Image: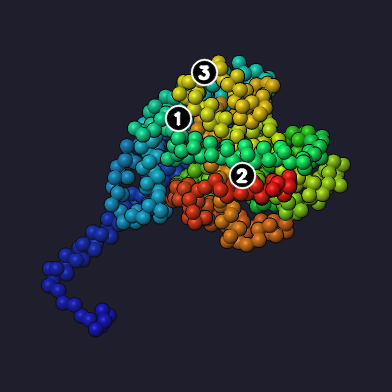
Amino acid sequence: MTTSSARTFVPEIFSETVQMSQTQMNQTTSDHASTFDALCQTFRDAAKLSTTADLLEWDERTGMPRGGAEYRAEQVAHLRGLVHTLQTAPVIEEQLASLADWDAASDPHSDIGATLKCLADDYRRQCKLPSDLVQRTASCCVRGQGQWDAARKADDYSMFQPVLDEMLALKRETGELLKTDDQTVYEALLDEFEPGAKAAALTKTFADLRTELVALISEIKESPRQVDTSLITQKFPIEAQRAFSHVLAEAIGFDFNRGRLDETSHPFCTTIGPSDCRILTRYEPNFLPTSIFGTLHEAGHGLYEQGMRDDWFGLPPGSYASLGIHESQSRMWENLVGRTLPFWEHFTPQIQTHFPSELGQATAAELHRCFNSVSPSLIRVEADEATYNLHIIVRFELEQALISGELSTDDLPVAWADAYEQVIGVRPPSAADGVLQDVHWSAGLIGYFPTYTLGNLAAAQLYDAAKHSLGDIDSMVREGNFAPLRNWLVENVHQIGRTRTADELVEQASGKPLSAEPLIQSLRTRYSQVYDLN
């Protein structure tokens, strides 16, 4: 007997009860969906305000006259305050509580389940912060970036120190309010960028990585086959650099119908809306790699932003998993794609066209060697892959000391110079090339720096997974066919959003937990080609 042919007889009163229960269930489901929609709308509205503030900050970094800084700080602070008010409204707690038993949210990795989990975490975090502190910090970020820019141009740390002291005090206050029983103040700040990260675990990871890198750098220094970089240190016309940067970004897939490329004193990427992603680079007349790899780096960020799901914009499924994952995308296109021989076998004819006097006779092999030269340097964003993570280790240690109070801003310039001499082997001759070279602390991004190294680790592991899935990526790159890799990243990284943690995302995409091994192997393979290592 099948259910389709069977007849069921139930007492009339029981039948009515079943119908009522089904009606109630349908009503409950409808109520849950309605509540969920209302909750999401609040955060969509907050995103509109937040991205408007982002637009004002983009303008501040690209075209705002210096005299507009004070009022711009008030504008941004006001908007950040409104965002905080929306995101901490008491009704949110009620909505989250009413949705706790919703069957549709039972899977924490589903769009609905992840949204409720992440919004609950975000709500608890934001409710710990008073609106006044949020606004004061936002104001300091705007003023701080302006002061940093002026101080760096003047090579005068004393111009920046007062606003740095103000920012550190605000971040200590923030960290004290946010930290849980098992967190330090610094870890509470780190949590904003890399949720769940622990300073002790990062310290060990960085120490192990440093050991491997120092050994590799030593082998490179001892190699008889050193690299002459004079080819890329000529004087390169800025207009030609701008044009070639546009070519590179568009070639790897950055959609200029949904984004734009501008210039600033420190490259960055910001998203104003689901179809409005702004990337910024900078140009050095006597060092071509600055614009090339700065553009590839920011375009990598832009591809992540453009690859997310528009219909979830402003909500966890349409947001990045962590800053480490975001940096994995930028570092992948910058280094694992952009510094390879196949990449320059494809782009050599175009770079010859853009710089005929300087590089008209350059070969792909020569460019590849120049772009992979290893030498201790002062500037993080211009560092080679082998030494780059040493720059991060310096910042990671210094910012922890600043937040704990073990290091004062009076002693910071010397501490920075000493650390560079000890860890990297060079001593900054000036503040501009030393403690003032990065914008992050002026913008309140304390705890951000470790995400670059985490991004390097994830990039290498994800790239290996992509190669395993796609096959001969080198041949695709040599032909200028970047779509297969880009599409693989969209499917396995970009559209995952915050439905998984960073660690979960990497393990799901690669089949194994995050490890330093793929990065070390990648570097050894690359530099063995350039320096004939054993």
**Mark 2 vs 1, N-terminal side:** 1
222 or 112: nearer the eye? 222
Instruction: Give x and y (percent) for residue 62.
Output: 65, 32
**Mark 3 vs 1, N-terminal side:** 1
- The amino acid at mark 3 is Ser
409 or 27: nearer the eye? 409
Verify CB contact (< 8 Å) between mark 3 and mark 1: no
Residue at x 74% of width, y 41% of height: 223
Q: Which residue is mark 3?
A: 408
Marks 2 and 1, how far apart in space? 25 Å
Residue 482 in view (yes/no)? yes
Q: Which residue is mark 1?
A: 186
Marks 2 and 3, how far apart in space? 32 Å
Judged from the image, the secondary structure of the residue bearing numbered disc 2 is helix
- The amino acid at mark 1 is Tyr
Residue at x 53% of width, y 39% of height: 208
Judged from the image, the secondary structure of the residue bearing numbered disc 3 is loop
- The amino acid at mark 2 is Arg
Instruction: Give x and y (percent) for residue 162.
Output: 55, 17
Judged from the image, the secondary structure of the residue bearing numbered disc 1 is helix
- Answer few, some or many: residues within 10 Å of disc 2's Cα (few below 14, many 20 plus, some between 14 and 19): many
Left or right of residue 494, residue 362 in this image: right
**Mark 2 vs 3, N-terminal side:** 2
Residue 71 sits above or below residue 509 on the image? above
515 or 263: nearer the eye? 515
Q: Which residue is mark 2?
A: 331
